[in-house]
């Protein structure tokens, strides 16, 4: 199962992302240390039994119907040249990101210009959600969820407790809109 021979998943992920002309997303140390590269794949995961990251619905349904352990999935996955994307999925008790970015193709020749900024904002929001919980401005058992798929409209929402349905909000930019929602609640 573990096909990478490097001593460091961080080094491998950096090489993979930079080699594809992509910025490196936030890599929480505790999750990154558990990551491996499944055979014949261009992504890394800390999960042993899960589909590839192109199966976004599977991950969202799992989150709404259960309480998965913390995990991180990042890298490149898809179904051919025109439907391949960079993926960054990170789930912890406070926040969950499901971020996809279409890779440059004949249809979309340029990589999304703000991808590095988006990854930076994801890292800031992870800290901000924890602070909001510590300040009591959002419920301690809740989880902020942001889904920015490459091929369908983005959504964000708040899950009141693990395993409960998410109160979803359609969004032009789920990352910015959820950030503004969080910012409005902070002291």
Image (cartoon, rainbow, N blue to C red):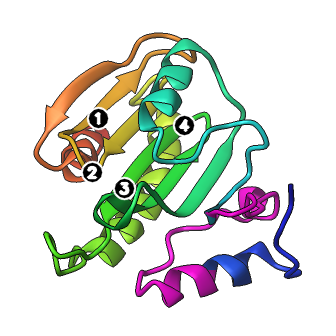
Left or right placement of residue 152 versus residue 101 in this view: left
Q: Which of marks 3 and 4 is in front?
A: 3
> In which quadrant will I find the N terminus?
bottom right
In x, y percent, where is residue 151?
24, 47
Q: Name the residue under label 1.
A: 156
Q: Which of marks 3 and 1 is nearer the N terminus?
A: 3
Could you say which quadrant of the image residue 141 lies in?
top right
Q: Under tag 1, what secondary structure? A: strand
In x, y percent, where is residue 15?
62, 87
**Vertical order, 99 against 116 (above or below):** above
Q: Earlier in the sequence, mark 3 or mark 4?
A: 4
Foreground residue, 147 or 128? 147
Q: Which of marks 3 and 1 is in front?
A: 3
**Vertical order, 82 against 11 (above or below):** above
In x, y percent, where is residue 104?
26, 76
Q: Which of marks 4 and 1 is nearer the N terminus?
A: 4
Q: Does the magenta stretch include residue 31?
A: yes
What is the chief secondary structure element of the magenta stretch?
Answer: loop
Q: Earlier in the sequence, mark 2 or mark 4?
A: 4
Q: Name the residue under label 4.
A: 94
Start-end of magenta stretch? 14-41
Are circles 2 and 1 on residues that touch, CB within 8 Å? yes
Q: Earlier in the sequence, mark 3 or mark 2?
A: 3
> In which quadrant will I find the C terminus?
top left
Q: Mark 3 points at which residue?
A: 100
Q: Which residue is drawn at 50% across and 35% down?
A: 133
In the image, which disc is placed on residue 175? 2
Instruction: Say whether residue 187 is visible.
Output: no
């Amino acid at each position: 199962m573990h096909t990478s021979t490097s001593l460091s998943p961080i080094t491998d992920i950096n090489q993979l992302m930079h080699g594809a002309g992509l910025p490196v997303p936030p890599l929480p140390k505790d999750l990154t240390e558990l990551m491996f590269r499944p055979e014949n794949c261009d992504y890394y995961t800390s999960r042993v039994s899960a589909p590839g990251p192109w199966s976004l619905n599977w991950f969202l349904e799992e989150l709404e119907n259960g309480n998965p352990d913390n995990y991180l999935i990042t890298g490149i996955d898809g179904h051919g040249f025109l439907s391949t994307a960079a993926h960054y999925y990170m789930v912890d008790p406070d926040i969950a990101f499901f971020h996809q970015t279409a890779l440059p193709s004949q249809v979309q020749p340029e990589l999304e210009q703000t991808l590095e900024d988006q990854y930076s904002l994801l890292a800031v929001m992870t800290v901000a959600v924890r602070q909001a919980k510590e300040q009591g401005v959002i419920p301690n058992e809740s989880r902020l969820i942001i889904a920015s798929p490459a091929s369908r409209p983005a959504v964000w929402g708040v899950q009141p407790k693990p395993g409960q349905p998410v109160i979803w909000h359609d969004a032009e930019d789920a990352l910015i809109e959820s950030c503004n929602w969080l910012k409005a609640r902070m002291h």
